[in-house]
Every structure is written in C-alpha cells, then in structure tokens.
Amino acid sequence: MFTVMQAFTSGLSELMTWTLALLGIYFFGSSVGHHFSLCPLDNLGFSWCPGCGLGRSIHHLMHGQFQVSWELHPLGGFALFVILWRLIELILHIKKQRKLWQTY
C-alpha cells in the first residue's frame, strides 16, 4: 500500500534530483570544444543528434546569454521552463503531503 510518507519521500527525491541537475548544469554545463558525452549517437560518430547542445543551451540561458543559448539548441528555453514547472509542482505536492502528514 502506498502511504503518505512514501509519496512524500518519492516527491522529495525527485525534487532533489532535478535541483542537483540544474545546479550541475549551471556550474559545470559549459565546455569548450569536444567533451565526454553520454549520447549514444555522438559515441557512434554521428555529428548530429536532436538532444545534443540542450544542456549547454540551458546553461547559457541561466547565465543570461540568450543568443548563445538559442544557437546551441532552440528548445533550451522550453526545456528549462518544463523543468522549473516540474520543480514548482513538486514543491506544492510536498507542502500538501506535509500538511496531510501533520494531521495524523
């Protein structure tokens, strides 16, 4: 049975994961030249991938470099918006679950 505490901790772990991911992108997201990549297409030698540049685009967007962000990946702003929206949803969910937990 899925309890209130399990829902709280699962939301908290996702919140921590997204927060750490955004902090990592903010501080370590930009690299000059070619870098290590987990992208399977890049590792197979393809020069184009629909997701490549997305992390660097988000990095530059968070630093206010909008033109560079757009040039690296046009959907970087949308991806950042979706992640921030999810963070807000998780915070609201955790606050709601905490209220329910306190009523027991």
Image (cartoon, grey):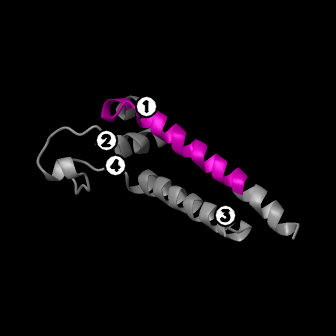
In magenta segment, residue 32: no
Q: Residues within 10 Å of mark 3 (few under 14, many from 20)?
A: few
Disc 2 secondary structure class: loop
Tell me how far mark 2 sits from mark 3, CA to CA: 31 Å
Chain part drawn in magenta: 70-93
Crowd band around label 2 with a 10 angstrom C-alpha radius: few (<14), some (14–19), many (20+): few
Q: Is residue 11 left or right of residue 49?
A: right
Q: CA distance from mark 1 to mark 2?
A: 18 Å
Which residue is labeled 4 in the image? 30
Residue 75, given in percent of the width and then of the height, sits at: 40, 33
Front one among 30 and 90 = 90
Q: Earlier in the sequence, mark 3 or mark 4?
A: 3
Q: Going from the N terminus, do you reach mark 2 or mark 3 first?
A: 3
Residue 6 at what x, y percent from top left? 66, 69
Mark-to-mark CA distance, 1 and 4:
14 Å
Residue tagged by mark 1? 66
Q: Amino acid at mark 4?
A: Ser
Q: Tell which tag, 3 or 1, sits nearer the viewer.
A: 3
Marks 2 and 3: which is nearer the front? 3
